[in-house]
Amino acid sequence: MPSSTTAPAQGPLSGIRVLELGQLIAAPFATKILGEFGAEVIKVEPPNDGDPLRKWRKMHEGTSLWWYLQSRNKKSIAINLKSPDGLAVVKDLVRSADVVVENFRPGGLEKLGLGWDVLSALNPKLVMVRISGYGQTGPYRDRPGFGAIGESMGGIRFTTGSPDSPPARVGVSIGDTLASLHGVIGALMALLHVKTGGGAGQVIDVSLVESVFNVMESLVPEYDLLGEVRTRTGGALPGITPSNTYPTKDGGFVVIAGNSDPIFRRLMTAIGRPDLAEDPALRGNDGRSAVAAMLDGVIADWTRTRTVDEALQALDAADVPAGRIYSVADIVADPHYAARDMILEAELPGGTKVKMPGIVPKLSGTPGSVRWQGPALGAHTDAVLANLGRDPETIERLRREGAVQ
């Protein structure tokens, strides 16, 4: 198993400095990605407790395992943003930064004296990613917005779950991570504008609601022209047939995607229904979607006579896309994950070895890397301040006065 610290330190974002003024999920996940591809990420945390993520979910010797993953490759500095000296440190960092990523509630940075007008005056080339629940404008901008709210208002929860059950959530913080990815995309586009086009810096305004809404496919035009309100359909993909989750005789499930025209014909042949494979009415998706329930029933009748492994073997032989529902145990044991370096071995403080997820996407020439796991609170404060020109006596004074930790 490859180590998470053996990859080269250089990356396509080497030389880019990113200042993170955020906590928990949305902003830190965005900077995690930037750090994995070579950016220098300086994470500003409040003294004493730091980012609350340090204590979220499952812990190892008092620190969240999620923290070690989400904060890898970052430098932690503990700064009191309510201290004038602490604010002066942040402003000095902004002068040399390429990107600032923040997820305060709109107006939060302005109250601290760190609004866009102040930061862009310090650094006209600065790119600022602002991630919030509802965006920096609009009638809801001042409302508190978490990922769960973004998922609800963005439309994904209304369409998730079984038809006879309340709306469900995806088992991870998908609203936050979708916003993070949109923030990374915006940051890279703005950086390209600055670095190659000589343009000025700008604000990337990312809303959790809009990030979810952006992946909701044809939801709006279907409603506007056809009056269709897409709702929960369980494991099926509405209007795309057949594509569903089917039970097996050993109590498991297989996911089968037989929704392209040639794949559908191969699927029907594989399950012993060549009559359906050759039925002219079923040659296109529109015809199949009109009888989706019937086709799902036919496929389920076949899968119920086979184990998961037997069904997958037959479908693989017929070149039909299909798969099992993976648990994390399946993921960690799977040879394909291993072959793609998607399970890395990391080392925590004290020498404990632990498996961590690999890096996405895969770049052939300048791949991402993990240089270290999430650091201790304030682990890099002295080094960063020294790089800004603060001498040891000044750093000690700032620490005594509570401006830094």
Image: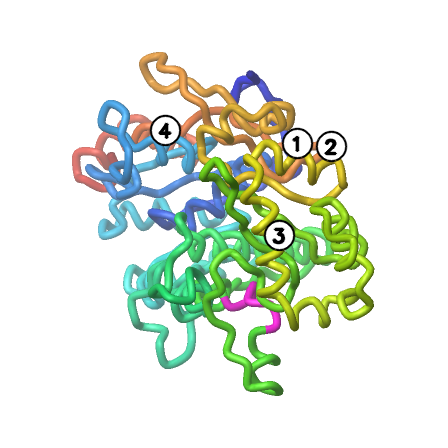
Query: Which residue is nearer to you in this view: 382 or 50?
Result: 50
- Amino acid marked by disc 4: Pro
Between discs 4 and 1, the one toward the N terminus: 1
Between discs 4 and 2, the one toward the N terminus: 2
Q: Mark 2 points at which residue?
A: 364
Q: Name the residue under label 3.
A: 299
In the picture, the disc for residue 367 is: 1
Q: In which quarter of the image is residue 209?
A: bottom left
Q: How far apart are marks 1 and 2 (CA)?
A: 6 Å
Left of 307 or right of it: where is 403? left
Q: Position of residue 177 (x, y in %)?
A: 46, 51
Q: Where is residue 28 in the image (x, y as percent from the top left)?
A: 42, 45
Residue 270: in magenta span? no
* Label 3 CA crowd tier, 10 Å (few <14, some 14–19, many 20+): many
- The chief SS type of the magenta part is loop
Q: Mark 4 points at which residue?
A: 375
Between discs 4 and 3, the one toward the N terminus: 3
Q: Distance between the residues labelled 3 and 1?
A: 42 Å
What range is drawn magenta here?
213-218
Between discs 3 and 1, the one toward the N terminus: 3
Query: Which residue is nearer to you in this view: 214 or 289?
Result: 289
- Amino acid marked by disc 2: Ser
In this rendering, the label closer to the viewer, 4 or 3: 3
* Label 2 CA crowd tier, 10 Å (few <14, some 14–19, many 20+): few
- Name the element at disc 4: loop
Evaluate if marks 1 and 2 touch, with contact meaning CB atoms under 8 Å apart.
Answer: yes
Evaluate if marks 4 and 2 touch, with contact meaning CB atoms under 8 Å apart.
Answer: no
Q: Residue at x 41, y 79 (%)?
A: 138
Q: Distance between the residues labelled 4 and 1?
A: 22 Å
In this rendering, the label closer to the viewer, 3 or 1: 3
